């Protein structure tokens, strides 16, 4: 597994945990109307462990001959970045339209909700980037087999 795949797996794991955190946060604020701060320290600790573990996992070489990236990796990253860019440009107007239809033309939106929507779009974009990389490698550790 090369560095591009390791980065994609680490990013996928971190994005899914962050996504779970923000869904839980939205549920707390919007549905329960209260904020449990003690639980957020647990989420912060889990996220810190994932980020630190992800960096260790990404930069640890499996063999001394392992190269950081090659032309194929750069091509895969470019295609994954294009998929993420397109998903961002689809999700951003879609998120704005959903807010417009939910709130109407005369409604206003709270700052925390707008921030949450934009960050949610960012997380989905990062999820698309990671999955696009892993799909191009074939989801296996050794990459595509010809």
Image (cartoon, helix red, strand yellow):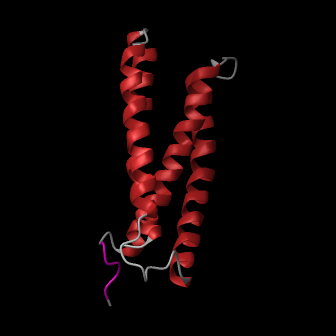
| Residue stretch rendered in magenta on the structure | 141-145
Q: Nearer the viewer, residue 63 or 14?
A: 63
In which quarter of the view is residue 74 placed?
bottom right
Tell me the residue at 61%/27% (across/down). Answer: 114
For the view shown, which residue lies furthest in the top direction?
A: 34
Q: Is residue 138 above or below residue 103?
A: below
For the view shown, which residue lies furthest in the front direction?
A: 64
In the picture, the quarter occupied by the C terminus is bottom left
Horizontal side, residue 140 vs residue 65: left or right? left
Horizontal side, residue 21 vs residue 70: left or right? left
Taking the magenta stretch, the answer to whether it contains residue 60 is no
Q: How many marks?
A: 0
| Residue 10 percent coordinates (x, y) | 41, 55
Q: Is residue 123 above or below residue 140?
A: above
Tell me the residue at 38%/41% (across/down). Answer: 49
Horizontal side, residue 24 vs residue 73: left or right? left
| Residue 45 percent coordinates (x, y) | 39, 32
Q: Is residue 64 above or below residue 7?
A: below
Taking the magenta stretch, the answer to whether it contains residue 143 is yes
In which quarter of the view is residue 22 placed?
top left
In the picture, the quarter occupied by the N terminus is bottom left
Q: Nearer the viewer, residue 15 or 121?
A: 15
Tell me the residue at 45%/45% (across/down). Answer: 51
Q: Is residue 15 visible?
A: no
Q: Main secondary structure of the magenta part?
A: loop
| Residue 57 percent coordinates (x, y) | 39, 59
């Amino acid at each position: 597994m090369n560095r591009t795949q390791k980065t994609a797996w680490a990013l996928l794991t971190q994005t899914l945990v962050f996504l779970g955190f923000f869904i839980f946060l939205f549920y707390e604020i919007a549905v329960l109307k209260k904020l449990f701060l003690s639980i957020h320290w647990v989420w912060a600790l889990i996220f810190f462990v994932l980020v630190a573990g992800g960096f260790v996992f990404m930069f640890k070489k499996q063999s001394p001959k392992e190269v950081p990236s090659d032309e194929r990796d750069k091509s895969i990253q470019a295609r994954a970045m294009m998929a993420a860019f397109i998903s961002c440009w689809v999700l951003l107007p879609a998120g704005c339209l959903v807010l417009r239809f939910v709130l109407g033309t005369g409604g206003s939106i709270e700052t925390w909700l707008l921030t949450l929507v934009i960050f949610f779009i960012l997380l989905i974009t990062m999820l698309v980037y990671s999955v696009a990389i892993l799909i191009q490698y074939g989801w296996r550790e050794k990459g595509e087999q010809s």
